[in-house]
Image (tube, helix red, strand yellow):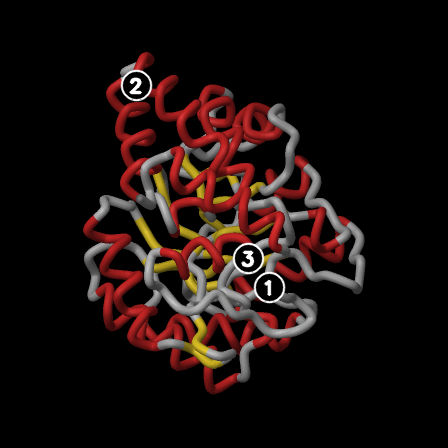
Amino acid sequence: MFKGLFTALITPFKKGNVDWDAFVRLIEYQIKSGVGGIVVCGTTGESAVMSEQEYKQTVELCVKTVNGRVPVIVGTGGNDTARTIEKTKFAQKAGADAALIVTPYYNKPTQEGLFLHYQAVHDETTLPIVLYNVPGRTGVNIGIDTVARLSGLSRIVGIKDATPDLMRPLRLKMAIERKDFSVLSGEDASIVAFLAHGGDGCISVTANVAPTLCAALHQAWERKDWSEIERLRDLLLPLHDAMFVETNPAPVKYAAAQLGFGDGSLRLPLCEVSEKSKEIILTALHSTGVAE
């Protein structure tokens, strides 16, 4: 079962191209800071605007750099089931530990369509699958009953649930019979409440720039150190908020650039954050001690 802190890794750019040196340094920074795993080529990694060659090179370099020190979960989802199967097979061949598969966007499948989509990927591949529910981006929500039904497939091992509904982890835990099914948050700011309602961990955007603090919070949770949990929760809140002051991953890429990971550039249709947002991000980086 996947649990604890996973970083939803950015793909650092330099003048719009992948900054491979910064990418490797960022991975090393994450591992040395104590994160429990890496998620590569997800939403935060801008996989939607990568060429096929860039996507494959990014996955392969991540797996090679991590070298088994922590689990690597690769984003392989899309709105085309056949293409999702193809990308999942590639991740499998590259040595990933699991695939993170977002609900098909734009198509707006029914709950039955969602089940059949994930079942098809499950049946055509051998990699463990983590469902990814982010209705604010995709326009479709995986129902609790559908997740419970999918959990009956042996290699569907968990879900990243990026919704503001803090009853979801509790309802998921109650609906799913398997004790080894991971329920992971995709919302940094509410992680303590998510864990309190039965969640197992977080796939974090903020951890790109504050991996030590984010890891410390999860470690404090394991120890049941309530005062430290409260301290870190409150300390990190302004940074969590700043990472979503504009559309992800624009804020976190700007923040990462302040720490020497890429130049903060993105690819259209995403663009650099505004001057006002930069001030908010810089203030948050300083207040948490991430940047001097």
Say left or right for 284 vs 84.
left
Kind of residue at badge 3: Pro
Q: Which residue is mark 2?
A: 228
Q: Which residue is mark 1?
A: 272
The mark found on residue 52 in the picture is: none
Measured as percent of width and height from the top left, residue 193 is found at 50, 22
| In the image, residue 195 above or below residue 33 | above
Pick the front one: 61 or 287: 287
Label 2 element class: helix
Instruction: Residue 177 in the image: state x and y as whole percent.
Output: 50, 31
Give the number of callouts: 3
In the visual, does 150 lie left or right of 194? right
Find residue 249 and name its label: 3
- Residue 98: quarter of image: bottom left
Quadrant for the N terminus, please: top left
Q: Residue furthest bottom?
A: 53
First in sequence: mark 1 vs mark 3: 3
C-alpha gap between disc 2 and disc 3: 28 Å
Identity of the residue drawn at 43% across and 78% down? 18
User: Considering depth in this image, is 125 or 160 the residue closer to the camera?
Assistant: 160
Q: Nearer the viewer's eye, disc 1 or disc 3?
A: 1
Instruction: Give 197 or 145, whichever is nearer the viewer.
Output: 197
The residue at 55%/37% (across/down) is: 241
Three-letter code for the amino acid on which mark 1 is drawn: Glu
Q: Determine whether the residue tagged by mark 1 lies in a helix, strand or loop.
A: loop
Looking at the image, is 70 positioned above or below residue 289?
below
